[in-house]
Amino acid sequence: MGARSRWVLAGLGLALLVAIVSPLASPDPDGLERVATDQGFAHREAPSWAEKLPFAEWFAGYELRGLSDPAAAKIAAGIAGTLAVFGLAWGAGAVLARARGAKRP
């Protein structure tokens, strides 16, 4: 296994670790949500385009639907999101490398 592969696996492992421990994070709103709540305009938030996608309801509230344990639902959503972003980035990199004629190590 090359050095690049080790770095990729280490990064993916770290991202998955963060997804697993994410339920331990504070349930309080982040800075922008807190300001919107304190100033009284949080209720005017418009749905984003991403919320209209067919699979968006699976991950509503940063939880994977269908799991009864809230902590497990958050962990599963974090892992699924991490793997999805990793796969998209890997695929985009492969397409760009192939378009440039780069050789695969």
Image (tube, rainbow, N blue to C red):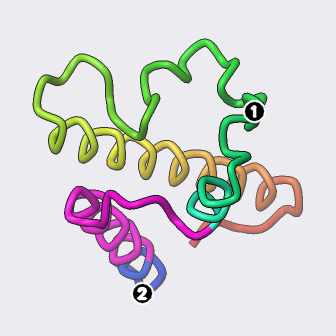
Q: What residue is rendered at 38% in x and 40% in y?
A: 80
The residue indicated by pointer 2 is 3
Q: Check the image and name the residue furthest to the top.
A: 54
- Range shown magenta: 8-31
Depth check: 46 or 6 in front? 46
Q: What residue is rendered at 13% in x and 23% in y?
A: 68
- Picture layout, residue 42 above or below residue 48: below
Q: Position of residue 105 (x, y in %)?
A: 57, 73
- Picture layout, residue 25 above or below residue 43: below
Q: Check the image and name the residue furthest to the left.
A: 69
The residue indicated by pointer 1 is 48
Q: Position of residue 102 (x, y in %)?
A: 78, 67
- Is residue 17 located in the magenta-colored stretch of the structure? yes
Q: Check the image and name the residue furthest to the bottom.
A: 3
Q: Check the image and name the residue furthest to the right.
A: 100
Left or right of 36 on screen, residue 97: right
- Picture layout, residue 92 above or below residue 61: below
Residue kind at label 1, given as amino acid type: Ser
Q: Position of residue 104 (x, y in %)?
A: 62, 66
Image quadrant assignment for residue 61: top left
Residue kind at label 2, given as amino acid type: Ala
Image quadrant assignment for residue 58: top left
- In the image, which disc is placed on residue 35? none
Depth check: 89 or 35 in front? 35
Where does the N terminus fall, quadrant-wise? bottom left
